Image (tube, helix red, strand yellow):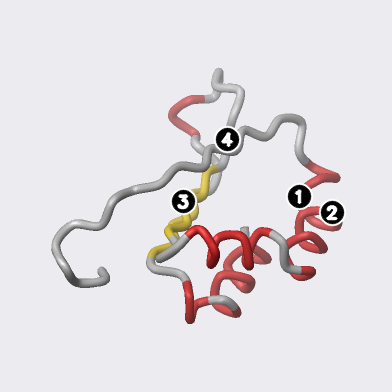
């Protein structure tokens, strides 16, 4: 998660919100133990992040070797009001 946090800081100029959670000790029987939510102002910004060399390198070198399962969800959230939060 520390490597993901560094990447989030690096790309903070086009990330609206980022939240990462470590091991979920309350749910030891769960198939998933870590989570991250990252909100982008646009689909284009999401694609820039996801397709960046830094993201791909982080996934390949840090996440992939220790990951048994991965569940990725991507969806669009309509803005509320007229201000970027």
Q: Are marks 2 and 4 in contact (CB under 8 Å)?
A: no
- Are circles 2 and 1 on residues that touch, CB within 8 Å? yes
Quarter of the image for residue 60 reads bottom right
- Which residue is labeled 1 in the image? 63
Q: CA distance from mark 4 to mark 3?
A: 14 Å
Residue drawn at (47%, 57%) of the image: 38
Quadrant assignment for the N terminus: bottom right
Residue 30, given in percent of the width and then of the height, sits at 55, 22
Question: Mark 3 and 1 residues: CB-CB less than 8 Å, in contact?
Answer: no
Q: How busy is the neighbourhood of tag 1: few (under 14 within 10 Å), some, or many (20 plus)? A: some
Placement of the C terminus among the 4 image quadrants: bottom left
- Front one among 83 and 24: 83
Q: Which residue is mark 4?
A: 33
- Is disc 4 placed on a helix, strand or loop? loop
| Mark found first going from the N terminus, 2 or 3 | 3
Q: State the separation of the CA atoms marked 2 and 1.
A: 6 Å
Number of marks present in the image shown: 4
Residue at 49% over, 54% down: 20
Q: Nearer the viewer, mark 2 or mark 4?
A: 2
Residue 79 place in picture, x, y as percent: 25, 57
Q: Residue at x 75, y 70 (%)?
A: 54
CA separation, marks 2 and 3? 19 Å
Q: Which residue is mark 3?
A: 37
Measure the alpha-carbon separation of dots 2 and 4: 19 Å
In screen coordinates, is 41 left or right of 64? Answer: left
In the image, residue 75 above or below residue 71: below
10 Å crowding of disc 2: few (<14), some (14-19), many (20+): few
Between marks 2 and 1 in the image, the one whose residue lies nearer the viewer: 2
| Residue at which label 2 appears | 60
């Amino acid at each position: 998660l520390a490597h993901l946090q560094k990447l989030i800081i690096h790309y903070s100029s086009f990330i609206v919100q980022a939240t990462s959670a470590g091991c979920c000790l309350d749910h030891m029987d769960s198939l998933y133990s870590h989570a991250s939510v990252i909100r982008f102002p646009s689909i284009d910004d999401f694609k820039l992040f996801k397709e960046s060399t830094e993201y791909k390198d982080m996934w390949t070198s840090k996440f992939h070797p220790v990951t048994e399962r991965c569940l990725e969800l991507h969806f669009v959230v309509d803005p509320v009001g007229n201000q970027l939060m």
